[in-house]
Amino acid sequence: MPEQNFENHGIVVTGYHRVTFLLIVIPLLWFGYRLGTDFAMDRLMLFVLALGMAFAAFYARAFALGVQDRVIRGEERARMARVLPPELAARIDDFTTDQLIGTRFASDEELPDLARRVLLGEFADRKAIKRAVKAWRADEERI
């Protein structure tokens, strides 16, 4: 596996992101087309079922990402309490979840300076914070 960095840290799981997406979207579009061209109650019910499956898949992913964000937030707060100098450690509660997620790839040595820059409002979002990381701390256990 290549060394992890900003460009390659995201993972695309083919079975989920591509195959499952198509297995949900294609029937949804087909049932919608059939419903629109020749209305019948059974076609309406198939369309509603396919729509429900699409919503279920979307929310399953959204809920999992929400839990992942909460875990990262807790891990980063604990790491910051250990790594940051006292004047910055006193401001850990000032970091938003997005900011904490953005700093997670910074090495322990780089974190104090990056945290200071984050608190000064230098970055627009978590992606910008990740881009600013110079000494990347890989997360090989992400899912």
Image (cartoon, rainbow, N blue to C red):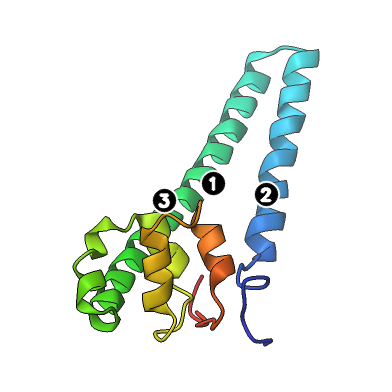
Task: Specify the label residue 21 is tagged with.
Answer: 2
Dot 3 amino acid type: Phe
Q: Find disc 1 in the rendering and name its residue.
A: 57
Q: Can you tell which mark lies on residue 31?
A: none
User: In the rendered image, is residue 116 in sight?
Assistant: yes
Q: Nearer the viewer, residue 131 or 16?
A: 131
Mark 1 residue type:
Ala
Q: Quadrant of residue 53?
A: top right
Quarter of the image with the N terminus in it: bottom right
Residue 4 drawn at (x, y percent): 61, 81
**Percent from the top left, x then y, of residue 105?**
48, 75
Q: Work out how far the residue at label 3 is from the one at label 2, CA to CA, in angstroms.
A: 17 Å
Q: Quadrant of residue 127?
A: bottom right
The reply to whether dot 3 and dot 1 touch (C-beta < 8 Å) is no
Q: From the viewer's perspective, is 78 left or right of 45?
A: left
Judge the density around disc 3: few (<14), some (14-19), many (≥20) Cα neighbours within 10 Å. Answer: few
Residue 40 falls left or right of residue 48:
right
Residue drawn at (36%, 60%), measured in percent from left and top? Answer: 119
Instruction: For the residues labelled 1 and 2, say whether their Cβ atoms are less than 8 Å apart.
Output: yes
Looking at the image, tell me whether mark 3 or mark 2 is earlier in sequence order: 2
Closer mark to the observer between disc 3 and disc 2: 3
Which one is in front, 48 or 59?
Answer: 59
Q: Between marks 3 and 1, how big is the CA–CA gap?
A: 10 Å
Three-letter amino acid code at the position of disc 2: Phe
Circle 1 crowding by C-alpha within 10 Å: few under 14, some 14–19, many from 20: some
Q: Which residue in the structure is indicated by mark 3?
A: 63
Q: Residue at x 64, y 86 (%)?
A: 3
Residue furthest to the right in view is: 37
Answer left or right for 12 relative to 60.
right
Q: For numbered disc 3, what is the local secondary structure? A: helix
Q: CA distance from mark 1 to mark 2?
A: 8 Å
